[in-house]
Amino acid sequence: MKRSVFRNRGLPYLLVLPQVVVTLVFFFWPAFGSLRLALYRSSPFGDRLMFTGLDNFTRLLGSGDYLESVLNSFVFASAVTFGGLAASLGLAVLANQKIRGLALYRTALLWPYGIAPAVAGIIWLFIFHPSYGILPFVLSAVASIQFNWLLKGWIAMLMIVTAAVWKQLGYNIAFFLAGLQAIPTSVLEAAQVDGADPVRRFWRVVFPLLSPITFFLFVLNMVFSFFETFGLVHAVTQGGPGHATEILVYKAYNDGFVNQQLGTSAAQSVILMVVVIGLTMLQFRYAEKKVTY
């Protein structure tokens, strides 16, 4: 393999400088700013900060509302991550079959990724709306079920989970489809000759070969569900009904920008960042061992 050699020793550093600047300005600077602000409490008029140490963190961890938002976040993230990956893998397997109009089906499956989370939430809001939504209308006509997300928190959670899964569906399918097409047909034919039925071939051959892609998408979808779903919740439920869909990222915004509790909001953002980093490290520590490269 030919090795690249830079005649100017400063050129490699110059090439990576823009990315380093972007990382420092848009990641490390806000992160350290939040960490500093989490140790203070702002005055009622927001004109000065009072040092309180770890008081913001202790009050948060003793708050029932905050612990409820933690539970909501883990339920939401688990449903979006596991449900989204399962649905994406199933659709990717179907899209990998040789059928007429396959290009049209694949395009339709990939389209939702181009939609913003807030727009995806509004689309599913029309479907779930108790007054003119098609889903409550069908359920009330067929089984006389009152399907109202404004009254039942679990329905609201189901709605935003469905919207988040649907929005991320195209991205996941694209990777799974690329992984399925990269599997040599000779491997599948050998398993078929050995007497493996389609189900056994999938679980014993196809799924282990897709494990690197599955692990990558698992981490990515988890980060997406914790951080990038703020627009969806804000546009659709705003944390309601009650606090049923108030996940951590939305509660941090609500306490900071609406209630003007800047120190508490900063402490929440620090805790959220630590939780996501910790979950990612656990995945690389334990889940990656089961990945077949």
Image (tube, rainbow, N blue to C red):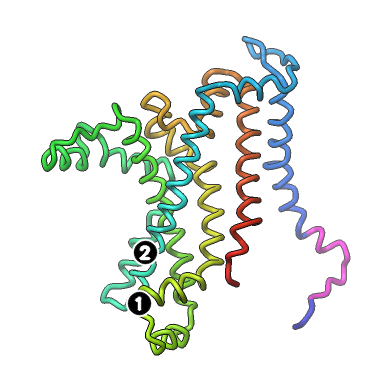
Q: Amino acid at mark 2?
A: Gly
Image check: 68 left or right of 13?
Answer: left
**For mark 1, what is the residue?**
198
- Residue 3, x across and y down, in percent: 79, 78
Q: Which residues are magenta?
A: 4-14
- Residue 254, x across and y down, in percent: 51, 25
Picture layout, residue 97 above or below residue 24: below
Name, please, the residue furthest toward the front: 195
Picture layout, residue 185 above or below residue 23: below
- Residue 40, x across and y down, in percent: 71, 20
**For mark 2, what is the residue?**
90
Measuring 37% from the left and 41% from the top, which residue is drawn there?
121
Q: Foreground mark, 1 or 2?
A: 1
Q: Amino acid at mark 1?
A: Pro
Q: Who is closer to the viewer here, 259 or 268?
A: 268
Assign the N terminus to one quadrant of the image.
bottom right
Q: Quadrant of residue 170?
A: bottom left
Mark with earlier residue (1, 2): 2
Image check: 117 left or right of 14?
Answer: left
